Image (cartoon, rainbow, N blue to C red):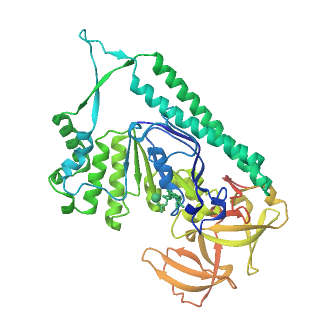
Amino acid sequence: MAKLLLRHVYKVYAGVGKVKKNAKAEAKKRSGDFVAVKDFNMEINDGEFIVFVGPSGCGKSTTLRMIAGLEDISGGELYIDDQLVNDVDAKDRDIAMVFQSYALYPHLTAYDNIAFGLKMRKIPVAKLDKDGNQVAKIDNKKISETAKKLKKLQKENEALAKDIEALKSSDKLDREQAEADIRYYSEKKALLEKRIEEAEKSLKYYQTTPVPQFNYVHMSKEEIDEKVQWAAGVLGIEELLDSKPAEMSGGQRQRIALGRAMVRGPKVFLLDEPLSNLDAKLRTAMRAEIVKLHNQLKTTFIYVTHDQIEAMTMGTRIVVMKLGVIQQIDTPTNLFDYPDNKFVAGFIGTPQMNFFESEIKREGDKLNVTFKDGQNVSLKLSELRSIQDEYLDGKPHSVYLGVRGENIRLDESGIKATLTIKEVLGNTTQLFLRFNGEDNDFIVSVPERNDLIPGDAVGVSFTEKFVHLFDRESELSIMSREYGNK
Ligand SMILES: Nc1ncnc2c1ncn2[C@@H]1O[C@H](COP(=O)(O)OP(=O)(O)OP(=O)(O)O)[C@@H](O)[C@H]1O
Ligand SMILES: [Mg+2]
């Protein structure tokens, strides 16, 4: 059980060679450096099921790996239960990680695969003197470890100081960029100094305070067996324990991998696309299993996926990422109902939300919307979510109007479009419609069947309550979560 706090966390991969050719300009901080995660801020409460979702390359795995301690944090702070853990080794963070590739040992049975980590691990048992009191002494190992860490941080700090000096005295033409770089490095340096201070404090503590001593012993066979049987029971794999991975299905292997993480009793479970090797049906089943597992264990879970349906069905809260930047952190329904920007609106929900380049203009208690082909609709302001004042000044403003297919109605008196394709799905019918002069279809899903055929002219109108508006430039939502406009 644990809570986590990520403050201004960055991951910067240095070196020109590592920048992807097609990486978007905004994801590159400075020439050569590639910012994979940018200013990640989040508080995760004990027992939450958090999902990181976003397209390939948006920094999900990198963030997860930084939390696990498998990847250095380039800037910012990571706390687990109020302890700063930037400098804590992965093995000391009490975190278990499950990957897409199960990485089971092929020559071991399921039982031994699950037990493997426990057999390797030594657990601390208090070292007692002859009177039964725990022995405490100055711990030279801790002192040398901490001193080494301190030295490493100091070296990093010196290198940063040199970089800053070099930037200050450089005759770089782009002074503005140089100043920005100096600010960036200085912030990084300030954080590093804080970590140095912590390390110095620890060192002093170990040098002056006797530390309680432990013997490290292997877990007993019985203890290990108890844990393996418990995990197998929870996961429903008791009858598989004697099988080897080659004899198991993908779903069964994934359960073994989960079992291996469970027996460690970690404070936090990190799962990186654990289901993507499974077929669609099994994926849906395992999805429910993992949610059940979370309900049972009540441990903090962080789950990475690029599948928005997985995110919506599993997360108590979802972090939507794009190009290393958090777009929105919210509950599944809030992401669906109140997307903060066009990217989130388009990413969450299938079929994708329809977007129309349009102009809005307030006329009394109506919002007049003009589409690219010149057609107009008049929406009742009182039924729309409340719009920022500056867009209601009676002047035209360029926006994207967003509306999901299920919130568009067929309406003979509505604006006209042409039917291009009709898909009868059984429970709904999807109509692909196109406005005159547009290059793209928009989708309307209607509950009823109909006799329309491609080429037919169709009238449509929007349900005001579900209309979204995004500024055309910034692509940010211009609406609040409340309804009605004065
Ligand atoms: N070791 C590395 N050196 C340089 N760049 C890297 C390194 N590891 C990852 N990156 C880059 O950082 C970005 C984020 O990678 P990450 O693996 O976190 O993406 P992701 O969101 O997990 O994507 P996917 O859904 O494909 O797994 C990518 O552009 C990737 O190319
Ligand atoms: Mg990944």
x and y percentages locating residue 472 in the rendered image: 73, 66
Is 357 drawn above or below residue 49 in the view shown? below
x and y percentages locating residue 325 in the rendered image: 60, 54
Of 426 and 175, which appears nearest the observer? 175
Q: Quadrant of the N terminus?
A: top left
Disc tally is 0
Q: Which residue lies at the image location 67% right of the left edge and 40% below the top edge?
A: 161
Q: Which residue lies at the image location 18% right of the left edge and 50% below the top edge?
A: 238
Is 276 drawn above or below residue 419 in the view shown? above
Q: Quadrant of the C terminus?
A: bottom right
Is 215 drawn above or below residue 71 in the view shown? above
x and y percentages locating residue 146 in the rendered image: 47, 29
**Furthest residue to the top?**
131
Residue 372 in view (yes/no): yes
Of 265 and 124, which appears nearest the observer? 124
Q: Which residue lies at the image location 58% right of the left edge and 59% below the top edge?
A: 322
x and y percentages locating residue 266 in the rendered image: 36, 39
